[in-house]
Image: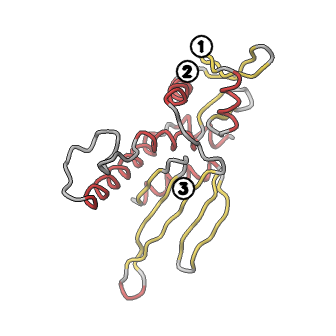
Amino acid sequence: MFHETVTHASGESRGNASESHGLLLLRRALKRGHAIEVTPAGGARITWSRMGHGGRALLRSITLAPHTPVGILTDDTVQDLNVIDTAANVRYGVRDGRRIITAGLFEVPALTTARYRARSLVTADRADRVRLTLTARLGLLAREHQDTDTGLCACGQITARPATPEEAHSLTRRHREAVAADFVTGLSATFAAAVAAS
């Protein structure tokens, strides 16, 4: 599900990470106090400093880039994904011989369902219960906290008026790291169990 890039003393290592491994890395980073930033593609970057020889701080990172980036999340897509994420009983169903997503009276049309599946925004267990993927959740968070023309976060939660573009960038980065930490903390045990079982 993710391309994983790890920076270390010898350079970089590249590999693949499953959704459950990606979630494990995010939770471990949170416990260790590492900075987490989400990416618009539906990935994340974990960074931390480590003391090297001579007392120099060395920056280390783990980058998770989704195999299938989430792409542009339109308002309609965000609305659908929010219903899928919050409804109690979301499943695959069939309408006119084609697979759809159902949540009570709410239905995602067949073509849209196929598009969400192809973009890896949703997945289902063996009982056809549908949930958002970690990639979709990260992409939604990044969309909510994208840059504005002023260099501040679009969410409107930063009320300070930075004096320079550098200060705006620093404020926004710290805000996004705090939001990402809250996101990882807020992931439910039900979601974690579903990811582990997939």
Q: Quadrant of the C terminus?
A: top right
Circle 2 residue: 88
Q: Rounded to the nearest whole Å, what is the CA distance between mark 3 and mark 2?
A: 28 Å
Q: Amino acid at mark 1?
A: Gly
Q: Secondary structure at mark 3?
A: helix
At x 53%, y 23%, the residue is 83
**Pointers 2 and 1 in contact (C-beta within 8 Å):** yes
Colour scheme employed for the rendering of this structure:
secondary structure
Outermost right residue: 97
Circle 3 residue: 25
Outermost bottom residue: 54
Compare marks 2 and 1 and give the one earlier in the sequence.
Answer: 2
Q: Rounded to the nearest whole Å, what is the CA distance between mark 1 and mark 3?
A: 34 Å
At x 54%, y 56%, the residue is 25
Image location (x, y in percent) of residue 5: 59, 64
Mark 2, mark 1: which one is toward the viewer?
1
Q: Amino acid at mark 3?
A: Leu
Image location (x, y in percent) of residue 27: 49, 51
Circle 1 residue: 104
Compare marks 1 and 3 and give the one earlier in the sequence.
Answer: 3
Image location (x, y in percent) of residue 168: 27, 55
Q: Amino acid at mark 2?
A: Ala
Q: Is residue 102 left or right of residue 35?
A: right
Image location (x, y in percent) of residue 2: 63, 53
Q: Is residue 15 above or below residue 177?
A: below
The quadrant holding residue 54 is: bottom left
Q: Is residue 96 left or right of residue 3?
A: right
